Image (tube, rainbow, N blue to C red):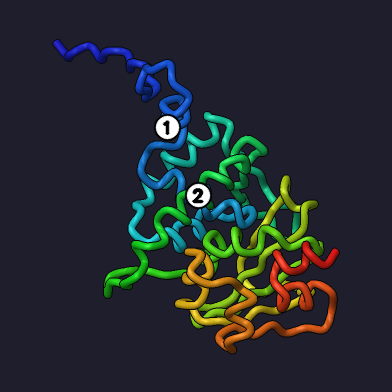
Amino acid sequence: MPRQQQPARPARRRSYDQYCAAARALDSVGDRWTLLIVRELLAGPRRYTDLHADLPGVSTDVLASRLRDMEQGGLAVRRRLPPPAAAAVYELTEHGRGLLPVLTALARWGAPALAERRPTDAVRAHWFALPLLRALDGLTRHGVVEVRLEEGEFHISTGAETSAGQVYGYGPAVQPDACLALTTDVALAIGRGDRTLAEAVRDGVAQVLGDGPLAAELRAGPTAARLTR
């Protein structure tokens, strides 16, 4: 007799089963790759193929599984862009965007480990947005700063109005209010807090382009700008 097929058991939700806020958070984002997917989506909606390209080392099966888990957990949604794009993209929910402070704190904690770049390390320009966000957090002028590194460009939104929205994005800005050109090493030093942006500009290792108020505040530095208001 053919063996009767048993009904599939429903997948059990992975959990630490601990009544602890940290454990509950890790139930949602503790799996490998999840927080790095959040890092990518913090820069805006992305297609599956783009996510896979900017997450070197993740398999297609794991990426698809993590995205499903994020949808089920209310961290991300999948939607279709209107024509002419007509492509499906993933984007963070408000709940998912709430992980920004977690990622910036994690980037600050991990920055000293970037003292030496290994030959096998992949790199993308927008990965340096997280270390720089803390340095630009005190800027009072609302606008967009285009950051230019050897690896490419990304852009950061400044000002209190951006706290609940998208704070950085891929590639050059459409209409930047200021441009910041510096090396990766200088960006990391600023992100670690080893030097301020104003010091980097003064020492000639960072260049601010632009004549508007945001460019002037970048040259002066967030702290100096607050003191002169």
Disc number placed over residue 105 in the picture, else none: 2
- Residue sitting at the far front: 227
Check disc 2 and give the amino acid type.
Ala
Outermost residue to the bottom: 204
Residue kind at label 1, given as amino acid type: Leu
Q: Is 111 rendered above or below residue 201?
A: above
Label 1, on which residue? 26
Residue 134, image x and y in percent? Answer: 59, 58
- Element assignment for label 1: helix
Q: Does 109 sit left or right of 103 as displayed?
A: left
Q: How packed is label 1: few (under 14 Cα within 10 Å), some, or many (20 or more)?
A: some
The structure residue drawn at horizontal position 61% and vertical position 50%, both measured from the top left corner, is 89
Find residue 8 and report its horizontal and vertical position in percent.
Answer: 33, 17
**The C terminus - image quarter:** bottom right
Q: Which residue is at the front of the view, 110 or 199? A: 199
Which of discs 1 and 2 lies nearer the camera? The answer is 2
Q: CA distance from mark 1 to mark 2?
A: 16 Å
What's the residue at 46%, 50% (across, down)? 106
Q: Is residue 23 left or right of residue 229?
A: left
Viewer-closest of 109 and 150: 109
Determine which quarter of the picture holds residue 228: bottom right
Residue 20 rendering spot, x and y as whole percentages: 44, 21
